[in-house]
Image: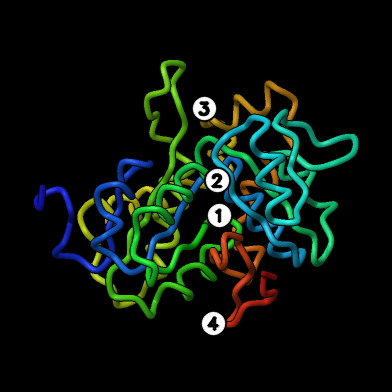
Amino acid sequence: MSYFSQSGYEVRLEWGIAAVENLAHEVDCIVIIDVMSFSTCVSIACDRGALLFPYPWKDQSAQEYARQKDAEAAHVDRRFSGPGYTLSPQSLLKLSAGNRLVLPSPNGSATTFKAKAVASASTALFCGSLRNLKATARACLGFSRILLVPCGERWTDGSLRPSLEDLTAAGGIIAHLAGKTPSPEAEAAVAVYRATPLDRLRECASAQELIERGFAADVDLCLEPDVSDLACQLVDDAFVGISDGKTRLISGP
């Protein structure tokens, strides 16, 4: 399996949960990327000073997990109107500093959960999006073995569908990792980032799905480049904002 690990390079890229299952033990920094919409939700929550707890299952168990974390569970049905929060980035614009939110997500949250379970306790775990490309890269520069994990989407049979928006964001982060040596896979992502105007991402499959479902405003939020100067790091089971190596908000017990 060593020929799949990209072990000769400081920056690696591989897709989905299988990437963390097979490569997490070989790196000291992992970046989870799920642009539409988990990673965007994480960035917005961190910008607003909230704590966001990822959770992989969209069922009643999310409520119990929220009780354990003294948090509120987001609704499993995506919407951005009405009370409460959902996987819609628009809904999270209502968060306030100190809010504690459990966000169920079958892609970004599930991949984060798996990474935390299989990686070393000393491995740094970040969530990256188009909103914080430069900030995420700055947070990763101090690590020597970095794994970018675009989550992709799912076909109806549950299999992975690689997604353009996640590959583009991964490439944008890698492009700002000055001095780091990328694998061919990581270098290809940079090429995609440099060749893809962000307005073209409105026409990609993931964006068109959300637009047709009435979530065009979410797509706009997901495609805002570098509007946040905070990286998002998993600390004590929750993502928090990181600026210049310091947490903006530290989670409670």
Mark 4 and mark 3 in contact? Answer it, CB < 8 Å: no
Distance from Cα at disc 2 to Cα at disc 1: 7 Å
Distance from Cα at disc 3 to Cα at disc 2: 13 Å
Distance from Cα at disc 3 to Cα at disc 1: 17 Å
Instruction: Please state which amino acid type lies under the numbered disc 3.
Output: Ala
Q: Which mark is residue 245?
A: 4
Mark 3 and mark 1 in contact? Answer it, CB < 8 Å: no
Query: Furthest-right residue in view?
Result: 82
Q: Which SS class for mark 4?
A: loop
Q: Earlier in the sequence, mark 4 or mark 3?
A: 3
Mark 1 or 4, closer to the camera = 4
Circle 4 residues within 10 Å: few <14, some 14–19, many ≥20: few
Instruction: Please state which amino acid type lies under the numbered disc 2.
Output: Val
Q: Residue at x 84, y 61 (%)?
A: 96
Instruction: Please state which amino acid type lies under the numbered disc 1.
Output: Leu
Mark 4 and mark 2 in contact? Answer it, CB < 8 Å: no
Question: Does residue 60 appear left or right of residue 124 in this picture?
Answer: right
Distance from Cα at disc 4 to Cα at disc 2: 23 Å
Question: Which residue bears the numbered disc 3?
Answer: 205
Mark 2 and mark 1 in contact? Answer it, CB < 8 Å: yes
Q: Which SS class for mark 3?
A: helix
Question: Which residue bears the numbered disc 2?
Answer: 35
